Amino acid sequence: MRVGVALACALLLTSVSALAEPAPELRVLSEHPVDGMRGGNLSGLALCGNELWTVSDRDDDQIYRLDTRQNTWQAETVHIDVPDVPDTGLPWGLRSRNWAASFVRGGDLDFEGITCDGAGNRYIVSEGHAAVLQVPVTGQANWLKISPMMVREARASGMLLQFNAIFEGLAINPAGDQMWLAAERQSRGLLLIKRKQTVWDCDGGCVLLSEGGMEMQPPQFPHAKPVNKDFSDLSLYNGKLFTLERNAYEICRRDPQTAKVERCWSYAAELLQPSRRYSQNYGLEEALIIDADGAWIGVDNNFGPRADGEVRPIVWRFAAPEGGWSAKP
């Protein structure tokens, strides 16, 4: 009996120790200030073929193609005519608060993420309305017809209850018939919807994950403290879902059907270097792309200067981790 108890305790301590091990650090290869965004506030990135696209959460009528030929990138405006937003089931109170805030900050739609399918169609998530806008390669922009069950399920699970904490990122599969959405915080979560004949709907259930709680900021953060767990963007690569977890300064690989964490990598050592720090007491990274060679991470600094005086949005290129994104712990 004593041997069994001792063995159980040893296994428990080993498990706790493994959980406590810090995530391996990613390495920055380059950084790129972005010029030409009218509203600043770079809040999403997408790779469509060989082109990088971004959105600002302050612009309702345009998205941006990024000219990446120089170290300083130039944002090229692409105008979009956005039709009236459908009723998604988000309560009037949250929608009215967003409408009122838009007069101060700009951006009633509050675009917070962009992604592309294999055909090059772009999809943009509106945090202000919990809706997804499709911008096809040709033709007019249109709002996806999403079953109101998605919002109902999310709210019943504790998500989408806080103003300015609705959907913060999205990802779509190359075939364009499965979409993942990230609820930002309090509670954060991941949802999956699938395209039926005319409507995007839950397939048995929309909610893959809903969780609240706090986690410690990384030790490199000045006066690190517990903060809300959050998601700020998603990227789908090689059949896996990658979450940008800005308060933890981590990227995590997750199972796309269960949302279970498989492995995480930290970018704290690079982005919390003294010259790269911002004065805000939380993470600001809101844009993520994962590819075979590495990751693109972009910051929404709201025109706030970092320690070296830079006020433009920044996109960093990180090298892929040792062993690649599929490596096991």
Image (cartoon, rainbow, N blue to C red):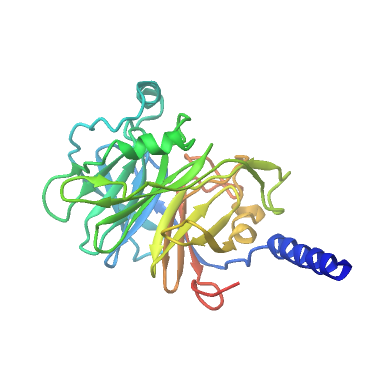
In the rendered image, the vertical position of residue 260 relative to residue 188, given as above or below: below
Kindly give the residue lying farthest to the right in the view shown: 2
The image quadrant of residue 61 is: top left
Q: Quadrant of the C terminus?
A: bottom right
Horizontal side of residue 324 vs 8, given as left or right: left
Q: Quadrant of the N terminus?
A: bottom right
Identity of the residue drawn at 78% across and 63% down: 13
Identity of the residue drawn at 12% across and 54% down: 138
Residue 280, percent across and down? 60, 40
Horizontal side of residue 12 vs 179, given as left or right: right
- Residue in the foreground of this view, choosing between 207 and 278: 207
Identity of the residue drawn at 39% across and 62% down: 236
Residue 239, percent across and down? 38, 67
Horizontal side of residue 88 vs 307, given as left or right: left
Kindly give the residue lying farthest to the bottom in the view shown: 323
Can you see residue 315?
no
The image quadrant of residue 99 is: top left
Residue 289, percent across and down? 41, 61
In the rendered image, the vertical position of residue 170 relative to residue 15, given as above or below: above
Kindly give the residue lying farthest to the left in the view shown: 139
Can you see residue 238?
yes
- Residue in the foreground of this view, choosing between 223 and 11: 11
- Residue in the foreground of this view, choosing between 49 and 233: 233
Q: How many marks?
A: 0
Residue 168, percent across and down? 42, 44
